[in-house]
Amino acid sequence: MGLLDGKVAIITGGSRGIGKAIAMLFAEEGANIAFTDLKADENFSTVEKELNALGVKAKGYTSNAANFDDCQNTVEHIVKDFGRVDALINNAGITQDNLLMRMTEQQWDAVITVNLKSIFNMTKAVQRTMLKQRFGSIVNMSSVVGVGGNAGQSNYSASKAGMIGFTKSIAKELGSRNVRCNAIAPGFIVTEMTAQLPQDVVEGWYEKIPLKRGGTPEEVAKTALFFASDLSSYVSGQVLTVCGAMQT
């Protein structure tokens, strides 16, 4: 018997990296999975097949989390297909790093829109269903740079810090209806994106981390499982860093 048997989870950006790891773990724990991504590429199709092979109901949806109407329509389709929504994992995000003196307005707007507006869009879209159910868990994927900042990432840091304020506010707004909202703040996680970094840069990061290694998407997924399941039934409005003690 899994921790999420019979539950329905929506995971944005669910076809790769941390999003995929969350989708796979949730499915292994018995959840039916609706995941979204911008386009239905090979990863998208493969993940959908892998999830269904685990014996749960799973379906991918092409959707732009940064577009309000698109999110409303996508969630309507998900509720029609699955009947309910028990967990929302706001995972979609991008980076466009630059020093402030070189950062363009486009770079600022793109990161704020995709990372921050998207959680407003998706949370707004699932709110009515969760309130009607009097049950739900919303998990927002922030970052340690949203807690401590980072040079060259003012747009990304601002978007992830904004997520934390949003998380705490929504926890207070929706708590009376048994809807919880928490945030995860990952540190240096080994993904396809970090795999493109030069080895000396990676080693430099590892030296700053007390555990002397990067985290894995699966380790972040376990934290999402805690927040989405009844293991955290009295935990709301919190931010949990998953960073090997890099941010303490």
Image (spheres, rainbow, N blue to C red):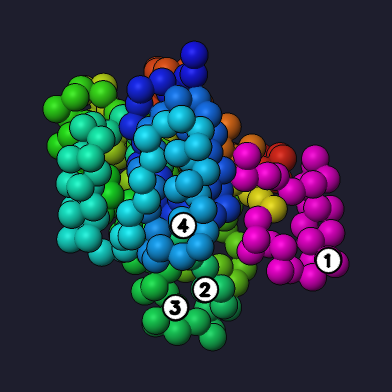
Count of numbered badges drawn on the protein = 4
Name the secondary structure under disc 3.
Answer: helix
Name the disc covering residue 107, or none. Answer: 3
Name the disc covering residue 96, or none. Answer: 2
Tag 4 near tag 2, CB within 8 Å: no
The residue under label 1 is 199
Which label sits in the foreground, 4 or 2? 4
Earlier in the chain: of badge 2 and badge 1, it is 2
Camera-nearest residue between 225 and 239: 225
Earlier in the chain: of badge 4 and badge 3, it is 4
Which label sits in the foreground, 4 or 3? 4
Give the image location of residue 170, x and y in percent.
28, 38
Whether residue 159 appears in this view of the structure is no
Which label sits in the foreground, 4 or 1? 4
Which label sits in the foreground, 1 or 3? 1
Q: Identity of the amino acid at label 4?
A: Phe
